[in-house]
Amino acid sequence: MTEIRTSPSATSGPLVSLDPDSSTAKHVQLEAAIRDAIRGGRLLRGQQLPSTRQFAADLGLSRGVVVEAYQQLTAEGYLTSRGGGYTTVAADRAPPSPAPPTPRALPRIDLLYGRPDVSRFPRAAWLRSMRTVLTKAPHDRFSYLEGYGAPELRSALANYLNRVRGTWAPADNVVVTSGFAQAWSLIVRVLAAAGVRTFAVEDPSFEDVRPIAAGAGLTVVGIGVDDEGIDVRALVASAADAVLVTPSHQLTGAVLSAPRRAALVRWAQQRNAIIVEDDYDSEYRYDQVAIGSLQGLAPDQVVYAGSASKTLAPGLRLGWLIAPNRLVGAVAAAKLDADRGSPVIDQLAFADFLETGAFDRHLRTMRPLYHARRDALLAALAARLPELRPVGISAGLHLMVWLPTDLDEQAVVTEAARRGLGINGLAPHRIAAADRGALILGFAKENERAIADGVDVLAAAINEVRRTRGTE
Ligand SMILES: Cc1ncc(COP(=O)(O)O)c(C=O)c1O
């Protein structure tokens, strides 16, 4: 290691440490060292560097190495050369950047909201679809595509959704997105540009949706939800010209009732408003027959959104929209603008996966598995925590329990987390304040045994919260 200081008065530590054994070129090492010294504040703006000749001699390098480093850093704006051959520092120290957030540790028992069992991802079947795609797809499929997505996937999705979800969609109305998250960003941008001003969302609703709508310049209003789903009367009374709903399985577990569905569609048709139907959790239904999509009832008023995050894996980032004729072009243009399209090989693999029936088979495997896990959670709650009455149990991957009024939601969630149990409170998803806490309990990720253990931990956490408050 060769160490050198520019001038004893200018720096208190070594400016340059070159490693003679490193495979990194000397000029690159020198550049990095000078850059670091400037960013770290050891070399200050205006300060003069040694001449190339002097520096090279001190370091035992050829002068050309130092010249190259100075030229590169001059091009990058870190150095400037003055008349007379002087080189001085031209940049300021970098402002201290906050430490990157540490990744959240996974809880020992994970009953968090929205976590499917990704260990059941159908790897072998997906691999078969991947192999088919890589063998058979024409070369031009791997080029830039239109914002709508791969034609094969748009058509496979239209076939699947029309058959299974009762949508009414030609493939032309389908746009492939990077999950629901992106679908929502595209929709709010497009609707804001089309003149929508006030967007209603269910209260409570998934907390991530509101800032995205507000970011697009929309006013967001919350509309209450009861055990029949969104309160359509309150929606009618509001100023909203669009609404986001989760009719198949609301965060509170509610499924939108038939009269409310009819009333919602009437509202949209009379006001010429848009319903965004997030068909979340529609694939999992335990004690009721599946209810068709709203989009099938009013294709001109509904933007339908779906995602493979809960059926296959969130990491796939595969989602889709069915948009009415008057909006679909703008949605595809916004998608192109956002990221030039979703990864095409995954799109084609998913198309094959749908068309070959592998998706149906996968769901047929997962439904009884999740059903059994839901039953295990209900049984454990009945045995260990009968005071917590579960609601919204007929569909999806989570249920909800109201907390007795003496229990603070955040205190229970925090104490459970301290004991290694991941659960969610409802409060972050609420818009209006409420006098009663609730917990959302996911049952998809863990097996029956772990679910029972999780409920034991929850019972212990609740005891602890009560003990420390002296209410027991
Ligand atoms: C209400 C709701 N819709 C959709 C999704 C799926 O989101 P994404 O497709 O971006 O993973 C989630 C995920 O948790 C959700 O909570």
Image: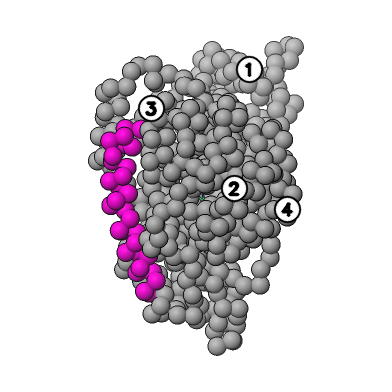
Whether tag 3 and tag 4 are in contact, CB under 8 A, the answer is no
Residue 320 picture location, percent across and down? 48, 37
N-terminal of the two: label 3 or label 1? 1
Q: CA distance from mark 4 to mark 1?
A: 58 Å
- Quadrant of the rendered structure where residue 316 is? top left
Q: CA distance from mark 3 to mark 2?
A: 31 Å
Query: Residue drawn 65% across and 36% down?
Result: 191
Which is in the foreground here, disc 4 or disc 1? 4
N-terminal of the two: label 4 or label 1? 1
N-terminal of the two: label 3 or label 4? 3
Which is in the foreground here, disc 3 or disc 1? 3
Query: Residue drawn 52% across and 25% down?
Result: 147
Whether tag 2 and tag 1 are in contact, CB under 8 A, the answer is no
Instruction: Name the one closer to the observer, 365 or 235.
Output: 235
N-terminal of the two: label 2 or label 1? 1
User: Which residue in the structure is indicated by mark 3?
Assistant: 152
Residue 151 picture location, percent across and down? 42, 25
Label at residue 294: none
Whether tag 4 and tag 1 are in contact, CB under 8 A, the answer is no
Residue 278 picture location, percent across and down? 52, 47
- Residue numbers of the magenta segment: 351-380
Q: Amino acid at mark 4?
A: Ser
N-terminal of the two: label 3 or label 2? 3
Residue 369 picture location, percent across and down? 30, 58
**Disc 4: CA contacts within 10 A as few (<14), some (14-19) or many (>=20):** some
Q: CA distance from mark 3 to mark 4?
A: 41 Å
Q: Secondary structure at mark 3?
A: helix
Q: Amino acid at mark 3?
A: Glu
Query: Residue drawn 63% across and 59% down?
Result: 231
